[in-house]
Image: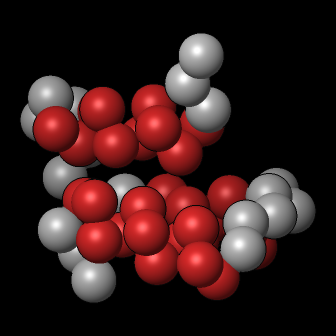
């Protein structure tokens, strides 16, 4: 089972999206998506964006 953040990482690695940070940021500000600072940082590190 993969969550939304995992799907975003797969999409980046497959070249479907160029960067994940603005997508996550928009989800947090526009849709009320909640993610811990630790997980946010881990996802950006895994995406090579932090």
What residue is shown at x 46% (from left), y 78% (from top)? 41
Left or right: 17, with 30 as reference point: left
**Would you place residue 38 above or below residue 15 in this image?**
below
As drawn, the residue found furthest toward the right would be 32
Where residue 32 sits, quadrant-wise, is bottom right
Q: Nearer the viewer, residue 21 or 47?
A: 47
Can residue 9 be seen?
A: yes
Indicate how the structure is coloured in the image: secondary structure
Left or right: 41, with 11 as reference point: right
Residue 17 percent coordinates (x, y): 25, 43
Left or right: 29, with 45 as reference point: right
Task: Count numbered badges in the picture.
Answer: 0
Where residue 2 sits, quadrant-wise, is top right
Left or right: 50, with 4 as reference point: left
What residue is shown at x 55% (from left), y 72% (from top)? 40
Can residue 30 be seen?
A: no
Residue 27 percent coordinates (x, y): 68, 58
Q: Nearer the viewer, residue 34 or 45?
A: 45
What residue is shown at x 81% (from left), y 64% (from top)? 34
Residue 50 percent coordinates (x, y): 27, 83
**Would you place residue 11 above or below residue 24 in this image?**
above
Where residue 38 sits, quadrant-wise, is bottom right
Residue 46 percent coordinates (x, y): 28, 60
Instruction: Check the picture and name the quadrant holding the N terminus.
Output: top right
């Amino acid at each position: 089972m993969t969550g939304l953040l995992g799907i975003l990482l797969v999409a980046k690695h497959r070249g479907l999206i160029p960067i994940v940070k603005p997508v996550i940021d928009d989800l947090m500000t526009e849709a009320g998506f909640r993610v811990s600072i630790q997980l946010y940082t881990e996802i950006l590190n895994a995406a090579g964006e932090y």
